[in-house]
Amino acid sequence: MDVFYFKIKSESKEVGDFMKIKVVNKSIDQKIFDNFKDKVYDMVFDISKKLNIDSDIIVNVCGNGTEKGVNGSCYSMKNRHIIYLYQHLFEREDDSLELVILHELVHAKDAYLINKKKDNFKTYKTYKKDIDNYIIKTGFDTWTEFHAHFIVNKISNDYKFSYTTLKMVKKYEEILSIKDKIIQTIKNKKDYNELLSEYFKKIDEYIYMFSTTMAANLFKNYNYEYVEKTQNKPAFKKVMKLYDKAYKLIGKMFHGTYGKHMEKRLFNIGYFIFDEFYYPLNIGIKKYRRGLDLCFFMERESENNV
């Protein structure tokens, strides 16, 4: 494993007196890594300065992700942020690499500024026993995904047209179809467990898509209207209702984002996710021995028109 390691005295007072950045080759060809390691380091350092992040950053350069379309990810701990970048970014001749680094560093900034506060909530904790903070964590995940896409969308068209309301509608209809199958196969443990695993995965994708689509919609400068047949779909009406509610909650995050109202606002976003996404899809919170986690419940009948 090759490591490109720097301890750099910052030239910017805004960043702080000392910053550590490591660029690590996890699983790509060494020649490719050698060709890009300086570029990755410079991008991470420059963007971190602009975002005022004063924290350790580790960049793991990996082979292509197992899931199609995965460009990068960010995992924040107490005093450092770990960013994952995937090989196909280095094979493109556009500005994708810089945009993905910016996207992931916005996640790092959100976590960094929240975790340095004296408030109770910390992004790196799992909160398996504290239901309020468990909900806040859900709100934070939704907010930071919106925020990262919003920042990138301000300077680039790369993301804007990848996410649409119609894709959201189709994803929601797909989820409802799986839910009906789960209810029908409740007595077949193997089929039930397989469907349930797929169900949770699709809902996670749905919530992620919701955050990114909201961030894209704000920058689309055309008045596109879907045909009447599409607008009359229950799933379409559901998605539009979600947009209206979410924008009101998200909008408040742009005023004193990391200030005294932050926890309450993140809680409200998290509660919105549980109330409008999880519960109508028969997903609730259950206390297990290992702590709080999501569960599927059967008490509510299928609500394909919610």
Image (cartoon, helix red, strand yellow):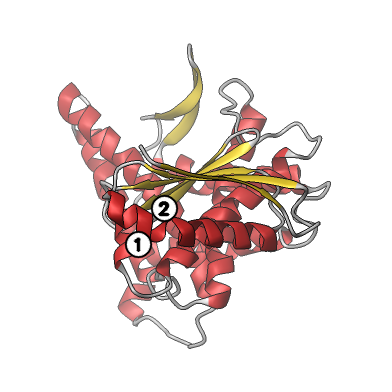
- Do the residues bearing badges 2 and 1 touch, measured as CB atoms within 8 Å? yes
Who comes first in sequence, dot 2 or dot 1?
2
* Of 131 and 290, the residue lying toward us: 290
* Of 30 and 168, the residue lying toward us: 30
The local secondary structure at tag 2 comes to strand
Using the rendered view, name the quadrant where residue 124 is placed: top right
Kindly identify the amino acid type of the residue bearing the numbered disc 1.
Leu
Say which mark, if any, is on residue 227: none
Residue 300, image x, y percentages: 40, 35
Residue 56, image x, y percentages: 62, 41
Q: Residue at x 59, y 67 (%)?
A: 151
Residue extending farthest top? 289
Residue 96, image x, y percentages: 41, 68
Question: Can residue 277 be seen at all in this image of the molecule?
Answer: yes
Say which mark, if any, is on residue 72: 2
Using the rendered view, name the quadrant where residue 122 is placed: top right
